[in-house]
Amino acid sequence: VVSVSTAGVWGNAEWPITEETPFGSKRASEYVRTKFEGDQLTWQLYEKKALPLVMIYPSAVLGPNDPNAAGRYVKNYALGRMPVQVFTDVPFPWVHVKDVCIAILMALENESNVGKRYIVSSENISFGQFNQMISEISGANLPIIKLPDWITILSAHFLTGLANLTKRPPLWDLSVDQIRLMKRGGQLDGRKAETELGVVYTPIRSALEEIIASFQEAGTQ
C-alpha cells in the first residue's frame, strides 16, 4: 500500500528535512494538520496490523492545467494579476507532478521498501526566485511592491474573514492557512527517492514552462 501524504507534515522541524528528521510540534495549516493525523492512523495499521505500507511525501506539486493553489499562483503572476510580491526571501520546496507519479509507481514495484518513507522534492527555491522564473518564461512584469510580512499576514486575516462572509475564496488566494504555509517555507532533501526509487527530477523551470504553455496555448485570460 502506497499512501501519499505531504512533506508539510514535518511542520516546524529543523531544515533541511530528510526522512529521518523528527516531526515538528506545529503544522502551518489545517491541510497539513489533518494530513499528519491521517498519517498517524495509517502507520498504526502498519505497526499493529502488518499493513505493507510505503509512504510518499511530496513537496509543493507543479504541473500543467492545475486548478489548485500552486497552479493558480503561477497563473496569477504569469498573467500579471498579482499586485504585490510576498515572502520573496522564503525558500519553498517544489516538484513536478510526473516525478511524484513515477515515485508512486516505483514504490509499488519495489519489493523491499515496506515501512519506508520517501520525500519527493526537486528544488528549494525562494519565492522571489520562483516569481522571477515565471516572469522570464511568461514575459509578464513582476510587481515592484514587495509587501512586508506583517502586512501580508494582516491582509490574509482580513480577506479570509471577508471570504467567510461572502462564501467565496479569498482574493489572490490570500487565506490565513495559505499564508502561514508560505511564511513557514521549507527546505527538503529528496535524494532518497532518487537513490532508492530511481526518480530523476525534472527541473522546476521546465515545470513552469509546461504550466505557462498550457494556459497560453488554451488562450486563458
Image: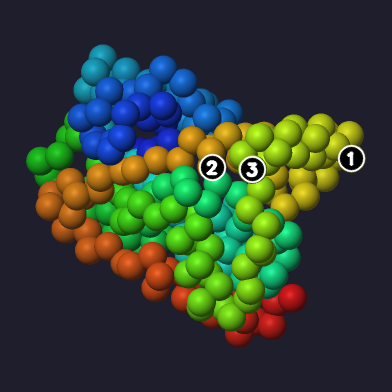
Q: Is mark 3 in CB contact (under 8 Å) with mark 2?
A: no
What's the distance in space between the residues labelled 3 and 1, CA to CA? 27 Å
Instruction: Please tell me whether mark 2 sits on a helix, a strand or a loop.
Output: helix
Instruction: Please tell me whether mark 3 sits on a helix, a strand or a loop.
Output: loop
Residue 168 location, quadrant: top right
Numbered tag placed on residue 166 in the rendering:
1
Q: Amino acid at mark 2?
A: Met
Q: Is residue 109 visible?
A: no
> In the rendered image of this protein, does residue 12 appear above or below residue 142?
above
Q: Which residue is mark 3?
A: 148
> In the rendered image of this protein, does residue 102 appear above or below residue 39?
below
- 184 left or right, relative to 191: right
Q: Amino acid at mark 1?
A: Thr
Q: Which residue is mark 2?
A: 182
> In the rendered image of this protein, does residue 21 appear above or below residue 142?
above
Label 1 or label 2, whichever comes before in sequence order: 1
For the image, the number of numbered tags is: 3
Q: Is residue 167 visible?
A: yes
- Density class for disc 1 (Cα within 10 Å; few <14, some 14-19, many ≥20) is few
* Residue 153 screen position, x and y as percent: 67, 35
Label 3 or label 2, whichever comes before in sequence order: 3
